């Protein structure tokens, strides 16, 4: 993020990780703990349920543009989600973000793709010798059904 306006081909100060003040565009009725860049906007970040900047402090004015202090580079990389479609073993499915607001967990209309990159969905979970024991009666599952809630970790190396 640039810390000052720059002309084309100019050199200036910026920040890629750490804590910095920044202007944030908010919906006063829905304030979130994260912020994200918006394409074409070089003056501020957009307040969001998930994003690359963690909001540490937010100005309390009623305006839609507020000063904030954000942490860049190490925002939460675990997202709560609700599947919008079934997730098969080693597959991918669309999900919406779940955030804590007004004292309860709420799905919001911010979607992302969940990848079962390590084969968590396992149709033969109870058949292996390394399971919790003999006589396991857990059901076989070909996929995790739509509507299921879960946690997703974002891995930097694959961006998934």
Image: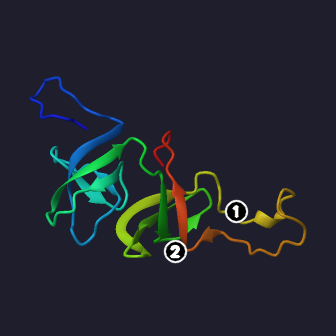
Q: Residues within 10 Å of mark 1 (few under 14, many from 20)?
A: some
Please provide percent x and percent y for residue 62.
Answer: 15, 67
Residue receiving disc 2: 146
Q: Nearer the viewer, residue 116 or 25?
A: 25
Residue at image location 49% in from the left, 59% down from the top: 114
* Quadrant of the rendered image containing residue 136: bottom right
Which image quarter is the N terminus in?
top left
Q: Residue furthest right?
A: 134
Please provide percent x and percent y for residue 124.
Answer: 76, 64
Gap between marks 1 and 2 measured at Cα: 16 Å
Q: Nearer the viewer, residue 11 or 23?
A: 23
* Quadrant of the rendered image containing residue 19: top left
Residue at image location 41% in from the left, 67% down from the top: 99
- The earlier-in-sequence mark between 1 and 2 is 1
Tell me the element at label 1: loop
Residue at image location 83% in from the left, 59% down from the top: 128
Quick check: 107 above or below 64? below
The total of numbered circles placed on residues is 2
């Amino acid at each position: 993020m640039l810390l000052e306006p720059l002309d084309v081909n100019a050199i200036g100060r910026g920040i890629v990780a750490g804590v910095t003040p920044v202007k944030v565009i908010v919906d006063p009725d829905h304030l979130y703990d994260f912020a994200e860049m918006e394409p074409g906007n070089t003056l501020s970040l957009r307040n969001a349920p998930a994003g690359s900047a963690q909001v540490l402090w937010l100005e309390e004015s009623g305006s839609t543009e507020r000063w904030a202090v954000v942490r860049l580079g190490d925002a939460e990389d675990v997202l709560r989600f609700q599947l919008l479609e079934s997730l098969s073993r080693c597959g991918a499915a669309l999900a919406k973000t779940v955030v804590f607001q007004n004292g309860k967990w709420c799905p919001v209309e911010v979607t992302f793709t969940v990848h079962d990159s390590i084969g968590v969905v396992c149709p033969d979970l109870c058949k292996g010798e390394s399971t919790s024991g003999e006589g396991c009666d857990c059901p076989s599952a070909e996929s995790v059904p739509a509507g299921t809630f879960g946690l997703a970790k974002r891995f930097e190396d694959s961006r998934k």
